[in-house]
Amino acid sequence: MKRQLTTILAADIVNFSRLIGADEEGVLSRRRQHQAEVILPLLNDHGGRVANTAGDSWLIEFPSAVEALRFAIQGQTKVEALNAELEEQARIRYRIGINVGDVVAEGDDLLGDGVNIAARLEALAPAGGVVISRSVRDQVRDRLDLDLHDLGELEVKNIARPVRAFQVIRDGEERMAPPGARPRLRTPVMLAAVLAVILTIGSLYWMRQPDFDPVAPETMALTLPDRPSIAVLPFTTLGDDASADWISDGITENIISTLSLAPDMLVIGRATAFTYKGRLVEPAEVATDLGVRYVLSGSVLKSGEKVRVTAELSDAIKGEQLWSIKEDSDNKNILYVQDRIAESLFLEMQVSLTVGESNRTITALAGDFQTSVRVIQGRDAFQRFDPAGHREAERIWTELHETNPHSPIGPYLLGWLPWQRVIIGLADDPAVEFDESRRLVAKALSMQEWGDPYTLIALIESATGNYDEANTAATRAIKLSPGGADANAIGGVALFQSGDTKRGIEHMLKGMRLEPDYPEWLPGALYPALLEDGKYDDVISLTKSVLGRDMRDARAHPQAYAGLVAAYALKGDLENARQIVSNLKTENPNLNVADVTRLFSLQSQSPRPFHEVLINSLETVGVPRAVD
């Protein structure tokens, strides 16, 4: 371990995440301009060496405190000149902290208290300003003509002793208030003056403008729930490292999966969240689209093995950004970072997590963050529902399981593959494939219990007519993952098919609310349940919504037409029902009742009184029982 005494300069961009969110291309272009025209030339002039960089921050080593301070003052002045021609909201400003101290060199990187103090001083500096430690002041005060503002002894996080700090005042720069300073009230007149100032500041605080236009709940596309509600947007990947994109997706999914385990919270599901990937959207827009109060956004920047994660939480109802977090980590410690973000969200929304730590995230189940990324990569292939995607998912998940055989995530994921072989027509014997799925899921649950495996059990048992088993599995899935979109949607289907129509509708609708960009198969499963419950207008509304969308699932539009015909027929609107039947017969002259009920998968269910009612109503509007 090599120790040395050196001068460390820490710098970062003020409000970098917000700037990126507003104008990513413009900010990155101006950052490159600053690097080319200001930072690199001044580094050359003053002998600085970049020890570490991560997106909006730099850690630079200098041969002397004098050269470091000259670099800082000249750099801030040059950046100020470049900003002069820009609108206020487009300006990039830097904070700089400088310290002389003992550091540990690891390769080109520098670590230790000397670095930590420089970083803490940087965080204290005002936008466009420079703060230095007493050790720097002692080195430069007889060599440079400076106006130094004494900030006093400061308590610095993770540093045992207070640090004496000084603000470097450039021409026109205001003096900052010493952190933690309190005015000494010596006379009644001074007390009155201070109270007047406090009241003035207080009134300005309450009159301050919000960060963005607040969203009125009545303008939201979906009803704002009474309980806390949040959308977690896909974290943005910064920089050129392609592998960082999977890290961004992994963090996003793990935060969603953690939050969705809270029973008293509405968390928008991953499928809907990822429709925003690659889009620059404002919190207000997301909240309006999805009917949520809170919006979390963030970014990931990867540099070698180091990762910088930022996150920002906004309250759309108030029009305010509530807080932001910036964490530097390596790949092994990302689990800590994402959990810290999730915990901060729970505290902000005052939601208690009522499940054990071991059940919290995909990462916890997988064993490490890298494995959870492989889970996501395999699922992306799996969800193509074609032979090529199936083979790719099988390759990834088999390798994952062989690498980490003691994790329950491996057999659970592999359990979906036999089921999918049946669904996409690759199975020679569906019964054998379903038995293999049951075996693998049982193995996963013997290692650890959580909600998702029970959704697969519910699907298999309902498909094979074992409705009591399907009901039990669905109920267990929902109990263990009350905020999970899949657990509610799939569990709801199984509950309905096993005869519990009311609960089936309740959980299918909850799954749809948790995933506003709902799976394309879900409406087709919901139509017959709503029809049986007499909610004909709801079916008409839902079918028209589906027919107005471009759906990839070839079954979606035929199912919607079937639902629309049935709803009109059962409602007694025979004119509309017959018109749709006439249109359908133009494309399929041999249309019969079996064609319609097959779309609802009613043949696989135990006969129920409603089925005969539905068939009779279809006959009434011109759909025959059998081909004439």
Image (spheres, rainbow, N blue to C red):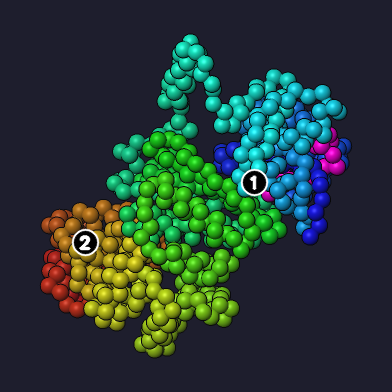
Quarter of the image where one finds residue 181: top right
Which region is colored magenta? 54-72
Task: Please indicate whether residue 519 sits to the left or right of residue 246 in the image.
Answer: left
Mark 2 residue crowding within 10 angstroms, few (<14) / some (14–19) / many (20+):
many
Residue sitting at the far top:
189
Q: Residue at x 50, y 41 (%)?
A: 323
Q: Choose between 432 and 38: the one closer to the eye.
A: 38
* Residue for badge 2: 530
Point out the tag, 1 or 2, that comes first from the N-terminus.
1
* Residue for badge 1: 160
SS at circle 1: loop
SS at circle 2: helix
Quarter of the image where one finds residue 80: top right
Residue 55 lies in magenta, yes or no?
yes
Q: Residue at x 69, y 34 (%)?
A: 164
Quarter of the image where one finds residue 423: bottom left
* Kind of residue at badge 1: Ala
Residue 403 rendering spot, x and y as whole percentages: 58, 78
Q: Residue at x 73, y 31 (%)?
A: 76
Q: Is residue 187 above or below residue 486?
A: above
